[in-house]
């Protein structure tokens, strides 16, 4: 038969999920499913900051949120220019 070896570290995956939820909480206040649904592009951006090619590359919440914060600040500036 064919045997499948799971090399994933379950504790590492749980820690990643915990860090992701904490990061989203810091970003959106108290995160809920609706926040994720209506701001899916930003959630994808957060995930892209944390994971690259299937590997966790960043777990520092401030480093993850900094680019998103800059993007949001710039979009607010742009909104103000056209009013």
Image: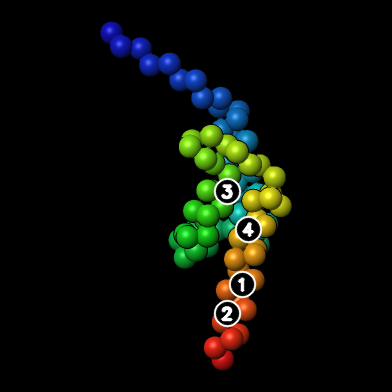
Judge from the rendering whether residue 57 lies leftward or rightward of residue 62; answer left or right. left
Q: Are marks 2 and 4 in contact (CB under 8 Å)?
A: no
Query: Distance from label 3 to label 4 (Cα)?
Result: 9 Å
Query: Distance from label 2 to label 4 (Cα)?
Result: 17 Å
Query: Distance from label 3 to label 1 (Cα)?
Result: 18 Å
Q: Which mark is residue 78?
A: 2
Residue under the image location 64 percent in, 65 percent down: 70
**Location of residue 40 with respect to 11 vertically, above or below:** below
**Tag 4 residue:** 67
Closer to the camera, 83 or 17?
Answer: 83
Secondary structure, mark 4, is helix
Q: Quadrant of the C terminus?
A: bottom right
**Tag 3 residue:** 49
Residue 75 in sight here: yes
Residue 73 percent coordinates (x, y): 64, 71
From the image, state whether disc 2 or disc 3 is nearer to you: 2
Residue under the image location 63 percent in, 58 percent down: 67
Q: Find residue 60 and report its image quarter.
A: top right
Q: Quadrant of the N terminus?
A: top left
Secondary structure, mark 2, is helix
Q: Which mark is residue 74?
A: 1
Query: Distance from label 2 to label 1 (Cα)?
Result: 6 Å
Residue 36 percent coordinates (x, y): 50, 58
* Marks 3 and 4, the one that precedes in the sequence: 3
Residue 34 in sight here: no
Residue 33 percent coordinates (x, y): 50, 58
Q: Quick one: which residue is furthest to the left in this view?
A: 1
Closer to the camera, 76 or 28?
Answer: 76
Secondary structure, mark 1, is helix
* Marks 3 and 1, the one that precedes in the sequence: 3
């Amino acid at each position: 038969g064919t045997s499948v070896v799971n090399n994933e570290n379950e504790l590492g995956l749980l820690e990643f999920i915990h860090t992701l939820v904490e990061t989203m909480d810091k970003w959106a206040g108290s995160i809920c499913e609706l926040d994720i649904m209506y701001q899916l592009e930003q959630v994808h951006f957060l995930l892209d900051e944390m994971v690259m090619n299937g590997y966790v590359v960043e777990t520092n919440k401030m480093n993850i949120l900094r680019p998103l914060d800059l993007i949001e600040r710039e979009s607010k500036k742009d909104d103000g220019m056209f009013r």
